[in-house]
Amino acid sequence: MSSTSVLFSGFKPFNYERYDGLGAIFITSQYEKFSNISPVKINNSDISDRPNAYNFVSDKTKVLVSLMNGPYHFLHDALGGTLQMIKNFPDALYIFDISAMHDFDKTYLNHWFKTLTKKNIDFKIVKLNEGDIVYVNNFYYKNGYNNSTNAANNLFEFFQDDIVNKDVKPFRKIYLSRKRMTERDYSAFLTPDPNWNGAPSQNHDTRMFDEHLLEEFLHYEFGFDIVIPETFETFADQINYMYETKTVVSMTSSGLTMSAFMQPGSNVFEIMNTMVVPLDRNKHNMAEEALHLFYISMAFIKGHNYFSIQNKTRKAQDVIERIKNTEYIQELLRG
C-alpha cells in the first residue's frame, strides 16, 4: 500500500482556490509538511479501478480539508476557515481527512462531526494515508495558512447551541495548566554551531520550568481554580466552562484557543515567552525563536481585556514577582 498525504488545513476567507473539471490528486508521503496540493487534470476515461483509490467525482461542489491535531491547529487553522466556507457554500460536500488526528483529539473531533450532522452539513470522513490516489472534481482546496481574523467569531457562532445558559454572568477565575502536555525536545536536530548567530536560546519547548509554583501562588493568593483542559469529559462541557469564565491566566498554549468561547469583557492574561519553531525537521539548525501573537488577536476580535506578562526566563518565580510588584495586576486577579 502506498504511503499517502494530501495537505489541506483550512481556508482563508476569500483566499481559496476552485478547481473546475476532473482532477486526480496524487498523494505524497510528507504529511507533516502542510503544503498546497497540485491536482493533475484528467479525463473520465482515465479513472481506473484501484483498491486504494478515493473517488469523489460528482456534480456537487466539494471542499477538501485535512484536520489537524491539537486544539489550536484543529479549531483555528482547520475549523476557522472551514466554517467560513460552510457559510459561503452550505450545500457543498465537505471531505475531511483525519490522518493527522490522534486519540486525544477525539473529544472535540467527535463533537465537530456531531454538530455538522445536526446542522445538516453533508460530509465524508477519509484517511488519506490509507489510499494512493484521490479522484475529485469541482472542488475548493486550501492555498495558504488560515489567518482568518474572524475565526474566533465563527467558532463561537457555530457552537452556540452547546451553551446551556446564555444569560449567565461570568464568574470563574481559572489557570490553564500544561502539566499534561508532552514538551517538545528539538535537541536531536539543533546541534551547536558557532557560526549560527540566530540559534534559539533553548532546544526545547518547555514554557515554564516550575509551573507548579505559579499554580500554587494563583490558587492560594487569588483563589484561582487550576484547570487541565485535557480532563474535560466532553467538548460541550469545556465550551460552557469557558463561557462562565471571567478571568483566565495561561502561558502561551493551545488551551487559550478556548477563550473564543468566553464572553466579551472577560479578562485574558497570557504569560508570554518565545517558542522554538522548527523550520525544517530534516536539517540541523533550522529553527527560530518566535512569539505567538494569535491570542492577542483573538482577544481583540472577541472584545476581551488582554494582558501579557513577559516570561523570558521561563521561571515561575519571575512571573510571581512581576505580579507581586504590580498593583493593578493584583487588583484584576482579585476581582
Image: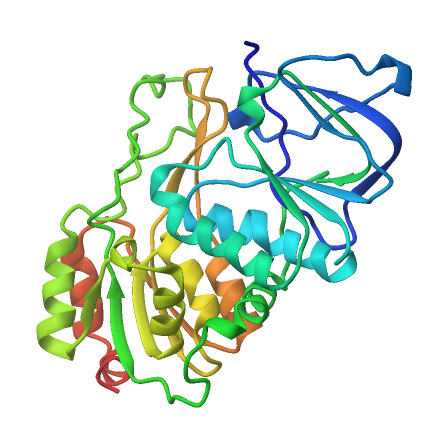
Q: Does residue 308 show up?
A: no
Q: Quadrant of residue 101?
A: top left
**Residue beneath the point at 34% across and 50% down:** 273
Residue 282 x %, y %: 46, 15
Instruction: Name the residue rendered at 62%, 52% in the picture.
Output: 147
Q: How is the image coloured?
A: rainbow
Where is residue 18 shown, x and y percent of the image?
A: 84, 40
For this view, does 164 lie left or right of residue 204?
right
Q: Nearer the viewer, residue 171 or 19?
A: 19
Quarter holding residue 177: bottom left
Number of marks: 0
Residue 101 vertical position relative to residue 78 in the rendered view, above or below: above
Query: Which residue: 22% across, 80% down?
Result: 330
Q: Quadrant of residue 60?
A: top right
Q: Residue at x 17, y 53 (%)?
A: 211
Q: Position of residue 270 (x, y in %)?
A: 35, 63
Question: Split into 4 quadrants, where in the image is the C terminus?
Answer: bottom left
Pick the front one: 33 or 24: 24
Quadrant (top left, top right, bottom left, bottom right) of the N terminus: top right
Q: Is residue 15 left or right of residue 22?
A: left
Position above or below: 275 against 46 = below
- 63 sits left or right of 108 in the view: right
**Between residues 335 and 242, which one lies in front from this camera angle?**
242
Residue 19 percent across, percent down from the top left: 85, 35
Asked whether residue 194 is in view, the answer is yes
